[in-house]
Image (cartoon, grey):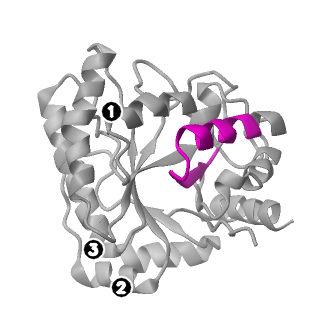
Amino acid sequence: MTPRSLIGGHVSVTGGLATGGLKYMAEIGAEMIQVFVTNPRGWALAEGKPEQDAKLAESGVDTFVHVPYLANFGSPSPETLDSSVALVRHTLRRAVAIGARGVVVHTGSAVTQPRDAAMRQLHEHLLPLLEEIPDGGPDLLLEPMAGQGAMLCATVQDLEPYLAALDWHPRAGVCLDTCHAFAAGHDLRTADGVRETFDALHKIAPGRLKLIHANDSKDDCGSKKDRHENIGAGLIGSQAFADLMRHPAVAGVPICIETPGKADKHRADIEVLKRLRDG
């Protein structure tokens, strides 16, 4: 029997990581969750509350943690690079405390420096963090971006040199965002486009796909614009999500929405994805 993908979303943790997160999970009908464990737009290394950490770990819910957006291992700024190392190390430690399956980090940008120099930084600064992950700890999931600017990884094909820079470390997984992939040029509107995208991913990084961010797109294929839309309301369309859930590379891989709106919109998006999965 083909493994079933859990469908959930990024949840609000207002009221406590476990108390707020699990409440929001129930409100939107999620089967898994993604959380931030610190300010998503800052460098602060916020400590958790042990009772909340334990409650979430003991819940048995499949949980993923997203690293704050500022982390960039391709940055030419030594301060940004050092802060990125500290932030990812902290997020991995917090993920262990809550029993998370994976930690998602954006693949970053070279900004103003040569791409080769930025890729060397991955080897020098991100690879050691992978080595630090304890047995039973979360995988570090690389999330390709939409392709704007000097992004180091946008298309599925870009994952090959990126993973090579990390020596194909076994704890380096992949989180594929459908909006990012579409913006980078993968035309997911057709069954052929979905198949080609996930065939390529499986060929380059077999078994490394650990999470999908299911987001429709406000902008067209190849736009290089990262603007999420609710499922079926954007230019990708709902059929793409049905097609990708039937690809062998996606079997059993959790699917997490990061769509606009509040609980009512998120509940509706999750219901659509569940119907597409189960129909």
Q: Quadrant of the N terminus?
A: bottom right
Residue annotated with mark 1: 165
Is 136 left or right of 191, judged from the image as shown? left
Is tag 3's residue or tag 1's residue first in the polypeptide sequence?
A: 3
Q: How crowded is the residue under tag 3: few (<14 C-alpha within 10 Å), some, or many (20+)?
A: some
Residue placed at 33% from the left, 71% from the top? Answer: 136
Q: Of discs 1 and 2, which sits in the foreground?
A: 1
Secondary structure, mark 1, is helix
Residue annotated with mark 3: 97
Residue 156's place in the image compared with 198, above or below, is: above
Task: Give yes or no for contact between labels 1 and 2 (Cβ–Cβ under 8 Å).
Answer: no
What amino acid type should be assigned to the residue bearing mark 2? Lys
Q: Which label number is shown at residue 174?
A: none
Q: How crowded is the residue under tag 1: few (<14 C-alpha within 10 Å), some, or many (20+)?
A: some
Residue placed at 31% from the left, 45% from the top? Answer: 41
Residue 102's place in the image compared with 179, above or below, is: below
What amino acid type should be assigned to the residue bearing mark 3? Ala
State the CA–CA distance, disc 3 to disc 1.
28 Å
Q: Is residue 197 magenta?
A: yes
Q: Residue 191: where, in percent of width, then height?
A: 83, 39
User: What range of the chain is rendered magenta?
Assistant: 195-215
Is 46 left or right of 203, judged from the image as shown? left
Q: Which label number is shown at residue 55?
A: 2
**Does any portion of residue 158 appear in the rendered image?**
yes
Secondary structure, mark 2, is helix
Residue 224's place in the image compared with 65, above or below, is: above
Is 30 left or right of 42, judged from the image as shown? right
Q: Is residue 72 magenta?
A: no
Residue placed at 61% from the left, 28% from the top? Answer: 183
Residue nearest the viewer, comparing 257 with 6:
6
Q: Of discs 2 and 3, which sits in the foreground?
A: 3
Give the residue furthest to the right: 279
